[in-house]
Image: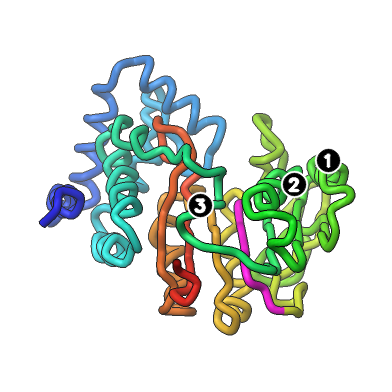
Amino acid sequence: MNYVDANFRWLLSQWNGKSKSVLYEEMKERYCSLPKEVKKSFEDFFEKYPYWGKLKEEEKEYEEIEKKALIFAEHQKELEEIYDGLGDYRSKKLFFAILYNWYSYDTKTLQDLMDQTYVQYYDLDLFSVKEEVFVDVGAYIGDSILNFIHSYGKDSYKKIYGYEVTKESYQTMEENLKGYPSIILKRKAVGKEKGHSFVSLNSQSNSANTLKNTGEEEVEVVSLDEDIQEEITMIKMDIEGGEKDALLGCKNHIEKEHPKLLISIYHGHEDLWKIPTMIRKWYPDYQFFLRFYGSSLFPTEIILYAIPKKEEF
């Protein structure tokens, strides 16, 4: 057994047979023993970006640790299935590093795996492109669309759709993409069904804005299955925890057309295994890869690449 597989099996053995409460106490004790400045960094981070749960030692609030303990205690089988199904050892090594960070607060292993070879989402070693109908869900200011064109060339797409909910970001995107042909921009949210929602602003960045049920800034919600009638060949999603609903809303496209999927899976602990499990049920012949572009403190900017086997190099 190679060392990557051995490390992952060892990690599973640390959880095997332990209850959620036992794992929770182990991780809480480990967290509380960290240097004060490290704990402050973690707690400041989770306060700014509350996707994963609260963490405040002074207030004896350890929701974030509880959520991880539940996964380790009850979902080892699912984690093992995802690991075994990953398409390369770079992905497997990263999967281990993410879980090891959650369990032990190790940052070194994550730091060594941060991808600096290619721009985020567009790993040239994983897939090629040709006359794509590319849908960017969470297009922000158009940066990921521009990076796509820069990475693959102006002749790489047939059409691009960009969805963004924040008014200011949308206006900047319109300006940034002015003059590029065959790009359709929509100030709409993408979800599992048609409806309406409200934009909730994040104090840190408009790129982290989310949706909520009430508010002042209303936005239309659409599903990709209803909103785009032509064949889609490639979908990128980064919508601050809304990825599962958005994927449900393009289930028909995925089942029938098998587009390349570039999906953020870091806005909740369960995304790491629930999203690939869901996708594989719809089309078993996807090959999965992981890449990491975020912080070594806590794993963010984790991208799941679901590539149809016919698309592989």
> Is 251 situated left or right of 141 in this image?
left
**Residue at 81 percent of width and 59 percent of height:** 183
Q: Report how far apart the C-alphas of labels 2 and 1 lie in the structure.
A: 8 Å
**Residue at 54 percent of width and 57 percent of height:** 263
Residue topped by disc 1: 172
Give the numbered dot on residue 142.
Answer: 2
Does the magenta portion include 116? no
Q: Report how far apart the C-alphas of labels 3 and 2 lie in the structure.
A: 18 Å
Which amino acid type corresponds to the residue marked 1 in the rendered image? Thr
Give the numbered dot on residue 123.
Answer: 3
Which amino acid type corresponds to the residue marked 2 in the rendered image? Gly
> Is 156 situated left or right of 305 in this image?
right
Res. 246 image quadrant:
bottom right
Which amino acid type corresponds to the residue marked 3 in the rendered image? Asp
Query: Against 67, is 233 above or below?
Result: below
Circle 1: element type: helix
Q: Nearer the viewer, mark 1 or mark 3?
A: 3
- In the picture, the quarter occupied by the C terminus is bottom left
**Residue at 42 percent of width and 78 percent of height:** 285
Residue 232 percent coordinates (x, y) = 67, 73
Q: Earlier in the sequence, mark 2 or mark 1?
A: 2
Task: Specify start and end residues of the magenta stretch as a single range.
Answer: 231-238
Q: Earlier in the sequence, mark 1 or mark 3?
A: 3
> Is 73 situated left or right of 48 in this image?
left
Q: Report how far apart the C-alphas of labels 1 and 3 lie in the structure.
A: 26 Å
Query: Against 216, is 47 above or below?
Result: above
Res. 41 image quadrant:
top left
- In the picture, the quarter occupied by the N terminus is bottom left
